[in-house]
Image: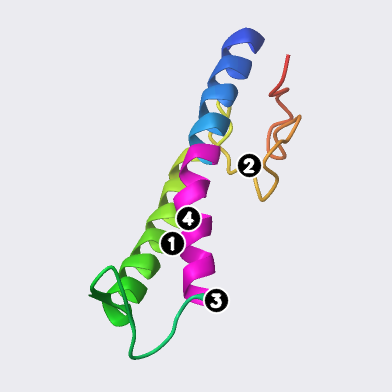
Amino acid sequence: MLPQEQIADEFRRRRSRQWFAAVPGIAAFFFVVFGFEPDSSFLGIDTDSLFILAAGVIVGYLMFSIWNWRCPACDGYLGKSMNPTFCIKCGARLKP
């Protein structure tokens, strides 16, 4: 098992990447849910193409989250919380 300091540092890096990736993922989700208007365009791109692009961004974000959002100590998935204090799998402390 890694030392506590390394676990906390790696968790901080993973959480930063997760927040950074969430911005386009959330924007794409809101476009799909609220911004989809058939037979229109945005910046000259038809909404069907934008819908496919947004769906691809959402799927990409979900795949990234599955890969990134893991405990630095045991590699277990950290769940839905964006700010856990402990790993739900191994109990490792994620914050100093």
Q: Which residue is mark 4?
A: 25
Question: Can the viewer see residue 69 in this picture?
Answer: no
Q: Secondary structure at mark 1?
A: helix
Q: Residue at x 54, y 67 (%)?
A: 30
Start-end of magenta stretch:
19-34
Task: State the SS at label 2.
Answer: loop
The residue indicated by pointer 2 is: 78
Which badge, 1 or 3, comes first in the chain's sequence?
A: 3
Q: Is there CB contact under 8 Å for labels 2 and 1? A: no
Residue 80: percent from left, percent from top: 67, 50
Of circles 4 and 3, the one toward us is 3
Q: Earlier in the sequence, mark 4 or mark 2?
A: 4
Q: Label 3, label 2: how many angstroms apart (C-alpha)?
A: 29 Å
Asked whether disc 3 touches disc 2, contact meaning CB atoms under 8 Å apart, the reply is no
* Three-letter residue code for mark 4: Gly
Q: Position of residue 69 (x, y in %)?
A: 54, 40
Q: Nearer the viewer, residue 8 or 34?
A: 34
Which label sits in the foreground, 1 or 3? 3
Q: Identify the element where label 4 is drawn.
A: helix
Q: Is residue 5 left or right of residue 56?
A: right
- Give the numbered dot on residue 13: none
The residues tagged by marks 4 and 1 sit, at their Cα atoms, a distance apart of 5 Å
Looking at the rendered image, the disc whose residue lies closer to the viewer, 3 or 2, is 3
Of tags 2 and 1, the one toward the viewer is: 1
Residue at point 55%, 39% (across, down) = 19
Give, as a three-letter code, the residue at label 1: Ile
- Marks 4 and 1: CB-CB under 8 Å? yes
Quarter of the figure that contains the N terminus: top right
Residue 34: mark: 3
Question: What type is the residue that disc 2 sits on?
Answer: Leu
Residue 11 appears at what percent x and percent y? 58, 25
- Label 4 and label 2: CA atoms lie apart by 18 Å
